[in-house]
Image: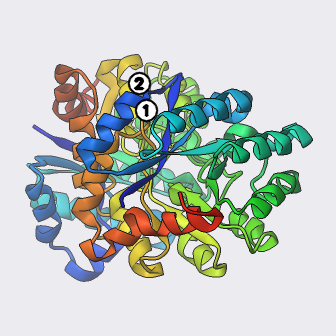
Amino acid sequence: MIIDCHTHWGICWQERDGADPANWLAVLDKHGINKAFLMPHAGIYSMKLCRTDNNTVAALAAQKPERLIPIGTTWPQMGKEAVEEARRCIVNLGMKGLKFHPWLQGFSTADHNFGEICGLMGELNAPVFFHDGTPCYSLPEQIGGLAKRFPKTKFVLGHSGILWNWRSALSVARHPNIWICLCGPHMRAMEILCRKTDPGRILWGTDFGFGFPDSIEYRLNLILRAKIDNKLREKILGENPLQLFKAE
Amino acid sequence: MLIDGYCALGQDREFDLTADALLRAMDVARVDRAVIAPPDRQLAVLNREGNTAMLRAARACPDRFIPACSVNPWYGNMAREELKRAIEQGARMLVLHPFVQGYLANDELVWPVLDVADQEKIPIYIHTGLPGNSTPWQLVDLAEHFPNVDFIMGHCGATDFWNDVIESAKAVVNIYLEASLTRPFTFDNYVKTLGKTKGIMGSFAPINELTFEWDQMRRVLPESEWPDVYGNNLLRLLEKRGAL
């Protein structure tokens, strides 16, 4: 079982294929990916498109529920509506979590409305995914601060600090409600993260779908080639992603 | 000739590459030569120790290793003197790492060492990317001050400055793009857009595995681009000082 925990229904895919995920899924098939966490793209680029893109992602996942696990988004700048949209994603649309990209979406993790959303996600047992590794709104330590403020909420570092902040990800992963997704760090960082982080809170992903290029081939081969204990690798690729959604 | 444009030779923290291991990996990947540069601590503080180690390794394998050197510009005149010494003894490239060495890439602090590089006709490899003190456009700013110096944009601003790479590389003629950390599925597009004379293959071993990186790049980059990207472009810059 291989689960890609970081993919997007990309704007370019939507423009070309409408609401048909067949071509997109064909790339997953080519690499033997069984399931994917499907996140928005248009919805994190444009506040105006947020609701409709959540509907789109939910509808896509409904076409292939055995393969696609839908993740929504919302914008703290929408005020009370943001919190309502967060609830709608999880309760009405059946999405399993929310994804945020604070530097693209332009909000601080200190935003009051965002705090409300984080609290709500803890109540609903729905993890909060981040683009992380980028100043000035998406650093792992800022997400570490959220993990302390909202101990009942699970937070996922969607890039484990990417290339230059992986040591930051390693440090904040000491919080029991922070999970890391190996999607961005180089091979050596992945190996060290796997040695030093709670083995039950490591995921893997590719960011596939953000554009047309096939990012799965490189990133799948990277984790398969890295010096990681085989049992841990299997856990990261197949078991941990399903544990993420289980209630504590 | 196939050249790996950037390998960090030495052992410290996450770096653990010996000369023997590098030669073995190069043989497996069918790479003829590799630029060898010191690991982080020797970029930040122990410059002379790192440079001496690279020069010694290259003297032991002159047909395989091309020594790079580094000086931290904060050392001022001492940095200039160490750079001159390293070049005189065979160093063919200057490595700058603003994030590790502690300055902004285009800070005038760097100018005195670039004057030396300019006089000695050696290219500059500059690490770029997050957290943001060495970005593609900072490199353009620097390159405009030194139009006769060739700058190699290590890692192409990976990852989150990827938006800036193509326009910044178009802005000046003396910037080249190095592949490591950029990932083949992204680097391929840069070469396609900017032309095959702009790309330089580098693995950044041992942070990345050399054989893996070369294998992955060969799967993606069209064969028509291999001679330039895998060797000729870098060779052209290195040989401005004379034949290797």
Q: Mark 1 lies on which chain?
A: A
Q: Quick one: B27 or A128, which is closer to the camera?
A: B27
Q: Name the residue under label 2.
A: A192
The type of residue carrying mark 2 is Ile
Dot 1 falls on a residue whose secondary structure is: helix
Q: In this view, does B166 lie to the left or right of B48?
A: left
* Whole-percent x, y for residue B55 in the image: 60, 36
Displayed quadrant of residue B208: top left
Q: Name the residue under label 1.
A: A189
Provide residue A135's location: percent of width, then percent of height: 64, 48
Q: Name the residue located 36 percent from the left edge and 27 percent from the top edge.
A: A191
Residue at point 63% right, 52% down?
Answer: B93
Query: In this picture, is A237 found above or below B97?
Result: above
Residue B181: % across, % down: 45, 50
Report x, y in % for residue A228: 26, 25
> Is B206 in front, or is A39?
B206
Q: Residue B197 carries which label?
A: none
Subunit under mark 2: A
Seen at 63% across and 79% down, the residue is B173
Q: Which one is in front, A14 or A63?
A: A14
Screen quadrant of the N terminus of chain A: top left
In this image, A99 relative to B6: left or right?
left
Which amino acid is tagged 1?
A: Ala
Q: How far apart are the two marked residues, 1 and 2, measured between alpha carbons?
A: 5 Å
Q: How is the image coloured?
A: rainbow
Specify whether residue B162 is in view: no
Q: What element carries label 2?
A: helix
Question: Is there CB contact under 8 Å for labels 1 and 2?
Answer: yes
Residue A201 picture quarter = top left
